Image: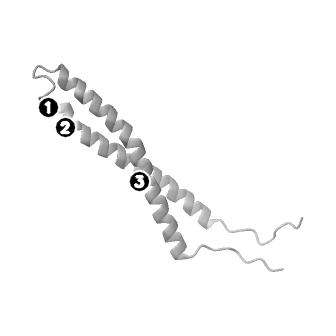
Amino acid sequence: MQHSPCEVTRPQLLRLYAANLASAFIMGITVAAPITGAASMVALGASCLSEAGCSAPTFVDQLVPVIGVTAWALTSVNVGVLQIRTLRRMASVRPSPKLPIR
């Protein structure tokens, strides 16, 4: 019996890339949410300790969105790169034409 290698077609590969990138963005959000929450608690504490009180925004308050977006972007890029590398490695592996018969 002839063994034919299972090759991934281009549309399948594109769907896999899209699924992996979507997964990377979701993982980025799950990492960025607690980091943003912690940054906002630090900002709230810093504004309440300032002379103006809790109602006046401080410089630390302006950093909260920057920290959140940066954490999300870095995590998404890192996870996306790792998933794409794994996907490429899996797609480039050729099955052996000789399978052992059991």
Q: Which mark is residue 62?
A: 2
Q: Nearer the viewer, residue 15 or 91?
A: 15
Q: Quadrant of residue 45?
A: top left
Q: Which mark is residue 57?
A: 1
Amino acid type, label 1: Pro
Residue drawn at 23 percent across, 37 percent down: 63
Residue 14 image position (x, y, % from top left): 49, 70
Q: Nearer the viewer, residue 69 or 100?
A: 69
Name the N-terminal-most of marks 1 and 2.
1
Name the N-terminal-most of marks 3 and 2.
3
Q: Quadrant of residue 1?
A: bottom right
CA separation, marks 3 and 1?
Answer: 30 Å
Residue with the most extreme bottom position:
2
CA separation, marks 1 and 2?
Answer: 8 Å
Tags 1 and 2 in contact by the CB under 8 Å rule?
Answer: yes
Label 3 sits on residue: 25
Amino acid type, label 3: Phe
Position of 17 with respect to 67 (left or right) is right
> How many numbered markers are drawn?
3
